[in-house]
Image (cartoon, rainbow, N blue to C red):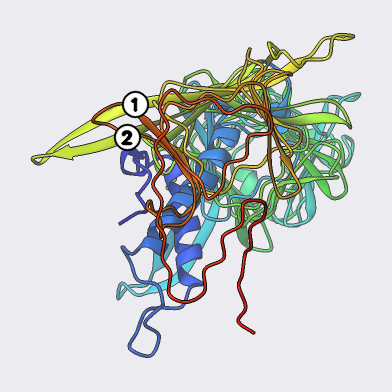
Amino acid sequence: MSVQLHPDIGQLDRSSLCYSIYSQLYHNFFNVQERKSAENPYGIEEGDETSVRLKNTAYGFASAIAGAVTGEGGSGEGGLLLDYLKKSGGDMTGMLRAAYGFEAGVGNTRILETYSTEETDSEGVVSAVEHGIRITGNLRLGGDSLYLGERQVLKYDAERATATLDASHLDMTAGTVSCSGEWLFGERESGVFISSTLLQVAGQDVYHRGNANLATVDWTMHDGSVQGDLAVAGEVLLGGALSALHGVRLGDGGRTLLTFSGEDAALSGNLSFGEGFGIRIDGKDVLVRETENRIRLGSIGGDLLLGSDDTPRIRLFSGLSDIDGDCLLVSPYGHACFPGSLTVRHDYGADLLSTYRTDAADEGIILHKRLRMGGADGFLITGDRETLSLTSDVEYVEEGVQTLAPHATAIGHYPSTSRYAPQNRKSESFVLTTDADFVTVGVPLEAAGHVGIDGSATRLANSVLYFTEELRLQAVVGGIKHYGDSLFTGSLSSEFFSSGFAGNGWAIRQNRTTGNVTATFDEVVARRRFRAYEFEVKKISAANGSLWVSDSCSGDTVEKL
């Protein structure tokens, strides 16, 4: 198989964010493909090259998204991750939804959580499901009102230091009401007044226990103790703090909305906040309703943690946007856009990839380390400010043993050393260097101008081969023009040559046995002087008809009349 599975996929922690995103992306990619079948032999099936490509693609997206969300792609206080909710903590600028459960706390201590409890009848059949919020720590509300069931149940007036409990019916069930202050029902002169030292009804003190059982007698007393249940048909006005240390149930319309039991504060209804109000911890806002339709979630000076060991994944039902809301950074389906910058690292290593921008004409991507093709051991590309280097291995297999021969090729621009460089300015050359033995081009190699040898006068231009400016071969009409002396170490002949009287062509050839050089031509003409140390004439004559011999002329043809 030519496509290799990315080796880092097998090393992913299945509980990690990167694995969750990778798994979701791969299943989405795989499920939109056509399956392989008898009718569709070119479809996809698990384990084939297409599925491996989809896994590698899903991992590439997942590692980039997880690196950005967890903060592994940046450092410092600014840059890309300024507005992200990192795994290590941070501030959110968008809405937080946790539709399948939520827990929050501080110092590794859970303080708030959502819960769901099934209620069963006597036969064990689930008849109802109770959903709510448990608060195991202190609940401090920065506003002056508490709304239960869209009703303002509790209101606090800071100027009068007075808390008002507004409910048509207050059911304390079997709980205990403790107050160190005073209770007043109605006006002091005509109502019921209860304090730690006095009980008055219509301004009259109540001193006897027996007359409290009479419906026609108002009751006023200094101290009172109820051994059983206390049922109040009207409103209850507390002038001091309400202490209920053995459990509290609050609600409306006969339905319990808020209960305190053990270490849990369970909310069975909606907790509503007005604009500018929310939840505070240590005097700092952690959940604030900023406007009518916008909520801000923050921490109290430390990291804001989202997720836990019991949270298999965090699913986005809405996209993550930048602080201005102009760009969707991460969509719920994995689309990502990083308009500020992008930095990619592997684990805790150095920067591998980043973006830069000087201006609109100078912006791009920087590869800080290596670029591999196909796999971690594939074709390698590296570079710096001056040189781009390409590295690959040549594989030899001899007697079943594999041997790799690594070679590198570098390209760059350097000061020119050409003899033909312009003399009136500086000149540079594009240089390709390699530690391989040869450079092979699979197609014809063409160049504009000429092809030459660096530092040498030898060059090949259009129709001219220069050795020097004086020694060259130049194409002319019908042949080649030689400039300079021509020296031959071997024979010289026409394209086709055969010796002898009946032969054809011409040649100047050296006899390998004697070393003599023989020249064969059809005719030899010497305009001035012909010298020969030895002259040998071989003549062939034939007469079969008329013979014409002349000492002053010759004829090419003879025609019989």
Instruction: Say which mark, if any, is on residue 13.
Output: none
- Is 396 situated left or right of 342 in this image? left
Farthest-out residue, left:
399
Instruction: Say which mark, if any, is on residue 406.
Output: 1
Is 184 located above or below residue 301 in the figure? Answer: below
Asked if one can make out residue 298 in the rendered structure from this viewpoint, the answer is: no
- Is 71 situated left or right of 505 in this image? right
> Which of 437/338 is in front?
437
Q: From the image, tell me which residue sits under label 2.
A: 394
Q: Identify the residue shown where x is 86% and y is 36%.
A: 276
Is 53 located above or below residue 512 in the figure? Answer: below
Under circle 2, the secondary element is strand
Q: How many marks?
A: 2
Q: Position of residue 301 (x, y in %)?
A: 66, 17
CA–CA distance in space, label 2 to label 1? 6 Å
Q: Identify the residue shown where x is 85% and y is 9%.
A: 423
> Which of 236/107 is in front?
107
Q: Are marks 2 and 1 in contact (CB under 8 Å)?
A: yes
Q: Position of residue 390 (x, y in %)?
A: 49, 29
Q: Position of residue 398 (x, y in %)?
A: 13, 38
Q: Amino acid at mark 2?
A: Val
Under circle 1, the secondary element is strand
Q: Earlier in the sequence, mark 2 or mark 1?
A: 2
Q: Identify the residue shown where x is 76% and y is 48%.
A: 477
- Is 31 situated left or right of 550 in this image? left
Q: Amino acid at mark 1?
A: Pro
> Which of 489/294 is in front?
489
